Image (cartoon, rainbow, N blue to C red):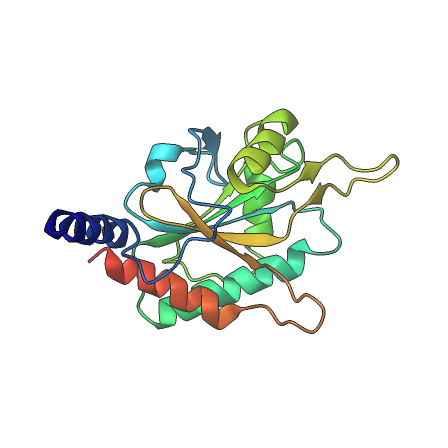
Amino acid sequence: MKRIIASILFSALIISGCSSSDVQTMSRYGNEINDFEVTDQNDESFERADMDGKVWLLNFMFTNCATVCPPMTTNMTNVVNELEENGVENYGVLSFSVDPETDTPDVLTEYMSWYDVPESTEWHLMTGYDYDFIRAFAEKNFKTIVAPPPKGSNQVTHGTSFYLIDENGTVIKDYAGVNVGDTEFPLSEIVSDVETLTNELE
């Protein structure tokens, strides 16, 4: 009996050690992001290994988007402004273009100039790949869709979620990137979760 009790206690310690973060991982996630190498708005290479040791927010967007992308980018800007005001460090933002053929580094740089992003924020807008890459990257890592525009349109179909990624490159959870029905964009929740994960790095 003593051995059984000891075994149960040992197992409980292992389980608690595996879920030590105060930010709980959603059941559909917990996967590490696949390796990649892309180009950001500064025409500099960015790869999966560059994410290590830092907390990230990630989303999908494109500069010609006529609907959800402007409010999504505004919402992300509001997040980083609150994080900066709170003195949060060791985090960054990754925005992957779903229209990389149009969204060259120069176009992405101009797009970012429309938003009031603090200079100290590490925010990479990604391009330098083809449609097959971004479709597979979105589906395999984030279980979301990227689909080509309907005939006669330049509007790519893509998800509107923001994704939280920990310092090991593990996808933790997602949030609505825009208002959904009567539910407002969860600004406070995102800021709190990023702050919690970055504090756990110390």
* Res 34 seen here: yes
Q: Residue furthest front?
A: 1
Q: Nearer the viewer, residue 132 or 115?
A: 132
Residue 47 falls left or right of residue 183: left
Q: Residue furthest left?
A: 2
Residue 15 falls left or right of residue 147: left
Residue 57 drawn above or below residue 144: below
The residue shown at (67%, 35%) is: 102
Q: Quadrant of residue 101?
A: top right
Q: Nearer the viewer, residue 176 or 94?
A: 176
Q: How many marks?
A: 0
Residue 180 drawn above or below residue 53: below
State the image coordinates of residue 157 (x, y, percent, origin top left).
73, 43
Residue 133 falls left or right of residue 30: right
State the image coordinates of residue 26 (x, y, percent, origin top left).
47, 53
* Res 116 seen here: no
